Image (cartoon, grey):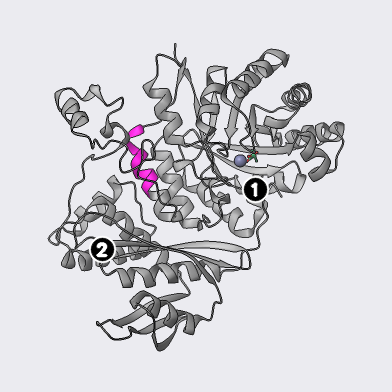
Amino acid sequence: MTEQLIIFDTTLRDGEQSPGASMTKDEKVRIAKALERMRVDVIEAGFAIASKGDFEAVEAVAKAVKDSRICSLSRALDADIDRAGEALRPANASRIHTFIATSPIHMKMKLRMEPDQVIENAVRAVKRARQHTDDVEFSPEDAGRSDTDFLCRILEAVIDAGATTLNIPDTVGYNLPNQFGSLIGTLRERIPNADKAVFSVHCHNDLGLAVANSLSAVMNGARQVECTINGLGERAGNAALEEVVMAVRTRQDMFPCDTNIDTQHIVAASRLVSGVTGFLVQPNKAIVGANAFAHESGIHQDGVLKNRETYEIMRAEDVGWNTNRMVLGKHSGRNAFRSRLLELGIELDSEAELNAAFTRFKELADKKHEIYDEDLQALVSDVVAATDERISLVSMKVCSETGETPEASITLSVDGHERHTQTSGSGPVDAAFKAIESIVQSHTELQLYSVSNITTGTDAQGEVNVRLEKGGRIVSGQGADTDIVIASAKAYLNALNKILEPAERAHPQV
Ligand code: KIV
Ligand code: ZN
């Protein structure tokens, strides 16, 4: 009998800890719904005590998702645990994930606690979490650099206190596959009550080994993997969900377990996360990169045409490439539009949003004959982002001519009041950004500006990513349009709206 490998997705929590990857509540709900559709078992929706916004996002995900278990992170502190329990109240199935550091360096330098105090705090936290839910996960942070005897002691104690999942994090991505796998094997063997909990792993990718370490742990008895879409996460990121899931699925000859994931939704989820965060997927990224299934050399193409298994170990359509890319056009009606959105897993919150999206769709269809799924996804992101923005684009005119200095004339709505200005720049985008900045006076620094095409052809929409920094805080913004200067202005405004929001939020590990 194949055992179940639980997939715990932490895109919305650890993923969001990547500088610049912060997401709004609505964006988190959209991603959570995509994860639910993919049949992710547990969704870590955030760190409820971090801020009012984080609390509301966990609560909104707990309300919106019914088929996946919803989890909130909390330090081993009563206030954190109670806040997590409160945010999770609407969930059909909830989990509290509490953690405390166990490596000598973290206990001494960060916590300034003796090992026995750390055990006491861990046990108290797990007992308190059990008052909110019977599904409690405990993580000894920096387990990958912790003493094995100490890990055995603390893990035995938290199981007795009621922990149902023991998550072993390689917090700094320091471990090697053999070593990490045998750590899991040793813990399972040596902890007397190990059979009362599920062993989980949470690997960071600092040495590029997060997926390899996770798989090695699974071969040694771990039955939950914590991962993120596109491998998003703190520093070099976490283990990529799509890689873990497809490795286990493709190599069933090697694994005694499999996941419940519906792999056909992987590419759509990857695109959604990349669109929302502005973290582009490299073309050669396994499974979800644009070239992951492309065969360039003639020998490979010839082989694949004769028998695809000569060079392909997975089928592109099994992870959602090229599935039913139904094309809409200017004659498509509201119903076709709405049902295509639903097939793509996009549910808009209100009729007003659906109307706004349909109007944008008609405008786009006038400029571009065929509207692909990718166009719809970008269009909906734009409409949802614009819904409650303080600053929005009313109109814009940009002149660029050989031998002349480009000029941008722009009207913005700022808190409901129209403001207009005209500025020149070294190019049309520079002029537009300068015009916006002269109205908004944000004093932010532009860290990244990139343009990519959403589909092919010169009539394609351009998707612009902008990353802004102010006082150490980094946000990213996205915008899409067939006119890349307008797309640039939208992306810049999207980022400005985020950076102008007050964002006092605690980081769980600091
Ligand atoms: O990397 C880590 O240790 C974490 C814990 C909070 C599980 O993210
Ligand atoms: Zn982590």
Q: Answer above or below: position of 417 versus 336.
A: below
Q: Is residue 134 visible?
A: no
Q: Tell me which amino acid carries mark 2.
A: Phe
In the current view of this chain or complex, which residue is farthest to the top? 1
Q: What range of the chain is rendered magenta?
A: 263-271
Q: Is residue 264 magenta?
A: yes
Magenta segment, prevailing SS (helix, strand or loop): helix
Q: Answer above or below: position of 484 versus 62.
A: below
Q: Tell me which amino acid carries mark 1.
A: Glu
User: Residue 502 in the image: x percent, y percent?
Assistant: 61, 68
Residue 444 is drawn in which quadrant? bottom right
Find the distance from the CA under tag 2 to the CA under tag 1: 37 Å
Q: Answer above or below: position of 300 versus 350.
A: above
Tell me whether the residue at label 2 lies in contact with that at label 1, contact meaning CB atoms closer than 8 angstroms: no
Residue at the image point whose x is 16% and y is 57% from the top: 370
Position of the N terminus by quadrant: top left
Q: Residues within 10 Å of mark 2 (few under 14, many from 20)?
A: many
Indicate which disc residue 86 carries. 1
Residue placed under numbered mark 2 in the picture: 358
Q: Is residue 65 magenta?
A: no
Q: Secondary structure at mark 1?
A: helix
